[in-house]
Amino acid sequence: MWPGQAMTLKVKKVIHHEKSQYQDVLIFESTDYGMVLVLDNVIQATERDEFSYQEMITHLAMNSHPNPKKVLVIGGGDGGVLREVVKHECVEEAILCDIDEAVIRLSKQYLPNMAVGFDHPKSKTHVGDGFKFLEEYKNTFDVIITDSSDPEGPAESLFQKPYFQLLHDALREGGVITTQGCTFPFVQEYRGESRKSRVSEEKTRQRRRHHYYRVALPASSSFFGPVLDSPYEIPRPGLANSIHQTAENQWLHMPLISKLKKDCKEIFPVAEYAYTTIPTYPSGQIGFMVCTKDAGRNVKEPLRKWSAEEEEKLCKYYNADIHKAAFVLPNFAKKALE
Ligand code: SPD
């Protein structure tokens, strides 16, 4: 998903490795980043930097709502987002729905500082398909946070446009969502088979070969912002609506983020892109879509704030200033989103 680059962490000890019903689950102890959770070969969380992602995906949404009482987390089986949600005293109920019991079980065993979220009296856990779960709820939640893995494997359906419509419909008036800033525009053709069954690496590779051309962009190309001469993959003509690509990062996926924002705006009256820094995600960054049903809401300013003392006690990354700063983009990204 990130052509020509990779992230390497030095392994001290492999703690656990299994093929769950849905994906490859690896937990290892690293020399410098503490325990690391890896799903289908992609780093999901390390003890050293997970707080950046978990705090930002959570509090950008929670503090953009005047009084979030009922909150849903789709995915997030390590428990870190749940841990952040229940820091808000106004929350009455926080439900987490993750498809893979193995992630929850192993996080409880090996990642207790994240899994602590499961122990809170307001937390409830449901193991199941987030897409199906949402179909059961209309006008129910104040905030929904989609903390998924990337869109190859069990999280695939969570990046498709119908999913965003379900999110919209499951929200109460004035509700807010955040999602990892991945894209759905290339997956509008629903692929039910892979949502339920495990997508093998070979199948994924075959699909990618079938659906993509591998191209090198000319040095003059501004299509990918400052990323020049990168080998990249573009959808083959006629197949562009049936394959997905991640769009988590301004350095790697700007055109896709731009399309994502546009498509979100077709569903939500307010849809903004924010990002955080995190060393163990590709290019040290990950983006979020923050959307609300309230056309008059400015999600770029926190509606609710903790005091400076509370902020310091509760969070290691998030504060009211960084909430605002997260929406401030460099010129190349700003231009692409305009
Ligand atoms: N490219 C990796 C994106 C991972 C996003 N989900 C992380 C789960 C942490 N709760």
Image (cartoon, rainbow, N blue to C red):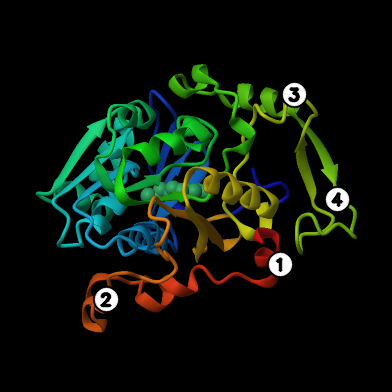
Callout 3, which amino acid? His
Callout 4, which amino acid? Leu
Question: In what quadrant of the picture does the N terminus appear?
Answer: top right
Q: What is the x, y in percent for residue 185?
A: 62, 38
Task: Note whether ligand 1 is within 8 Å of mark 3.
Answer: no
Determine crowd level at label 1: few under 14, some 14-19, many 20+ residues with C-alpha closer than 10 A.
some
How far separated are the C-alphas under marks 2 and 3?
49 Å
| Viewer-nearest of discs 3 and 1 | 1
Residue of label 2: 311
Taking depth in this image into account, of 248 and 289 the one nearest to the observer is 289
Task: Note whether ligand 1 is within 8 Å of mark 2.
Answer: no
Task: Note whether ligand 1 is within 8 Å of mark 4.
Answer: no
Residue of label 1: 332
- Which of the two discs, 3 and 1, labels the residue nearer the N terminus? 3
Q: Secondary structure at mark 2?
A: helix
Residue at 86 percent of width and 57 percent of height: 221
Q: What is the x, y in percent for residue 80?
A: 30, 53
How far separated are the C-alphas under marks 4 and 1?
17 Å
Residue of label 4: 217
